[in-house]
Every structure is written in C-alpha cells, then in structure tokens.
Amino acid sequence: MVVAFWICLSLVAYTFIGYGFLLSILVKIKRLFAKPFNFATNVNLPSVTLVIAAYNEEDLIDEKITNSLQLNYPKDKIKIMFVTDGSTDRTPDKVRVHPEIILLHQDLRAGKMAAIKRAIPFVTSEVIVFTDANTFLNEDAILELVKHYQNPKVGAVAGEKRILVAEKADASSAGEGFYWKYESLLKKLDYELYSNVGAAGELFSIRTALYQPVESDTIIDDHMIAMRIAEKGYIIAYEANAYAMETASENTSEELKRKIRIAAGGIQSILRLKRAANPFYYPVFTFQYISHRVLRWTITPFLLIIVFILNALIAYRTQILFYQILFALQASFYALSLLGLYFEQRNIRIKALFIPYYFCVMNYAVIAGIFRYFRKNQSAAWEKSKRKML
C-alpha cells in the first residue's frame, strides 16, 4: 500500500510540478551546447490566409472583423476568410457587407473541423493562420508567427492565449488566467527544448502544404491539426509575442462545460495520435507529449483520488505522524476547494480559494470528459461556452 501510494503521488507531483522543473533544467543544459535560431529581418514574407470559423457570433463579429482588418501585414499578402456554417443569427450578414473578406456560409452545421475542411480548398496561400471568432489578436501577431517559418524544420506555430481578468475576478476568471500563465511558461520551455505539443484554436498557424485532413468528428481540431504535422517530423514552434486575447468563461459552470469537452477531445486525440506516443519515431517529442498532455488527460485525475484514499488508510493503520500530516494537508486543500465552491455560488470573491477550487474543477472535468467520450455523448458540434463581457 505504501509503495503504491508513493508511485501514485510521484506521478501526480511530476505531472503538475515536476515536469516543469525537469524541463527548465533540460533547457538550461541545452543552452550550453546549442544556440537559438537567428531570424533574419529583411525577408520575403509568405502569403497568408486568416481562417476564422464563426458560429452565431453577431455580438462580437464586428469587433473581430475590425481587429482582423487592422492586423499589421502587407495587404497584398493576406486574405481573410470567415466560415459561418450553421449560423442562424446575423453573423453571415455582418461579414457579407465587407467585400474584402471571403465568406463561406452554408446552413448545415457539422462542427468546427468540418467547417475548416470545407475552407481548405479555397486557400491558396503558403501559410494558414487559424483564430477563433471571439478572440482578438495583437497588431503584429501574424508577423510574429510567420518569422518562425524561416526555420525549415518548423511546420506549425502556436500563439499565446491570454485571459482578460478583471480586478474583482471570480474563480473561473482568476483560475483560468493562472492556468494559462503556467501553460504559456511550459509551452515556451517545450519549444526551447524541442517542440510544442499541440496548439490552441485561439491562434495558431501551419504551412499550408503540410495540412492533413483530420476526421470530421474531431473534438479539439486545433490540437489534432498541429499534432498531425508534428507526427511527420516537423516542429511546432511557440511565439509568445503573437497572442489572442479573450475574456474568461462567464462562470464556473460554463468553464466546466468547456473543460469537459476539451477532456473528451483529449482522450480522443490520444487514441488517434499513435505515432506521437511512440518513442521510436521522435523520442524527445514523445517524452514531451506524454509528460505535458497524456498524463493530464488520462490517469492523473484518477491518481489524485487514489492518493487521497491510500493516504487516509496508511495514516489510520500506521499512526505515523508524517502520513497524518500529509493527509491533513490534502484534506485542507480539498476543504479550501469546497469553500471556494460555496463562496462562488454566493458571488463572494476570495482569491486565496480560487486556485484549489479551479484545480479540482479542472481534474473533475477530465474524469467527466473521459466518461462522456466513451459513452459517445460528445459531438464535434458542441454548444459553445458563454464568455464574460468586458
């Protein structure tokens, strides 16, 4: 029982903390032997198509259009394409009044991946940049993304996701904001070591020639598109100076809905990305993929429960003070999480409780997402989460 406890606890600690420390050490060692890639400044910029899948976004679409048109990139080298499949509000009509924008619309809604697959044949540029309709890019985002394609080993580039957190943020806002700051740090280190492991749909790009069709029932399309390119031996770069800004989920219930969907997509992608998990192809990438993604999306949330139960049994049976203190710390952490839930439901903001509460919500979502996927209850065309208004 004690051996099982320490194995499970070690895996949990490695997943959430240890991998980050190990990664930083490996990066420091690499810096001693390898110099970073130097980007040239006076280069011929590639042609770009900005692809935006939008479903019923009439409240934000005008701002998104304005943001897209104001991006700092040569106008003769960029095309903007909106795909509004299934939209039943005024989203297509608002896009249609802009002749400089390509609109692809059909009444049938089959999910974001199906919309992207329908858009690809209309793309003639060297690079495709994907972004969500409810996010806003910094002015130089595309310039920052495409510079990485000077390196012929790079096949895709992920931008940074930034959550706009109000000063009096609730648990969903503060927790999501903290999570993405930590994720951004890991992604930066992942890329410096070798490659990022996936991409977020808020902002990422690929070499058009490397695009591979992804199954239309894919739940997290952005991750799968980037990972299929990585499975061909290309690097997924990460660029923090290209970022997409969005508000947090409207509340914790909306954030939970989003996380469950991502978790269902995570287990789906793990079952399909067999080459990425095979160390005989690209061992460093496999190490990064399993450490950063696979453990989080599979066993670690279950291990948290096992660790708690085993710790309770060991503390009770052995009466060893160390295990009793360890169990008390675990119990206190989960008690703080329950307090966070209590105060969240009553609209009381206590920031000290946001992180334990969000941590538990996130891991519960993984368990729920796994069960939802195997019960075949997660469609590729999903009900989007509501976001806070600024």
Image: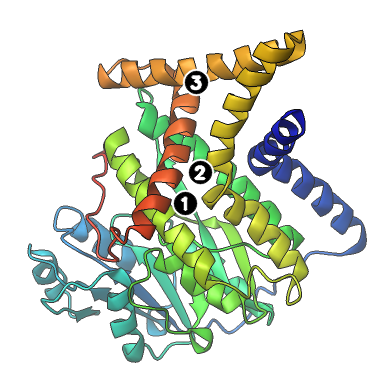
Say which residue label 3 marks.
334
Q: Is residue 348 above or below residue 147?
A: above
Tell me whether the residue at label 1 lies in contact with that at label 2, contact meaning CB atoms closer than 8 angstroms.
yes
Query: SS of the residue at dot 2?
Result: helix
Marks 2 and 3, Cα distance to the nearest angstrom? 22 Å
**Callout 1, which amino acid?**
Lys
Q: State left or right for residue 28 relative to residue 375.
A: right
Residue furthest out toward the right: 33
Local crowd size for mark 2, using a 10 Å CA cut-off: few (<14), some (14–19), many (≥20): some
Q: Looking at the picture, how far across and down is residue 57, in whole percent? A: 18, 58
The residue sitting at 43% across, 56% down in the picture is: 138
Q: Looking at the picture, how far across and down is residue 271, in whole percent? A: 51, 67
The residue sitting at 7% across, 62% down in the picture is: 89
Say which residue label 1 marks.
161
Say which residue label 2 marks.
180
Query: SS of the residue at dot 3?
Result: helix
**Image quadrant in which the C terminus is located:** top left
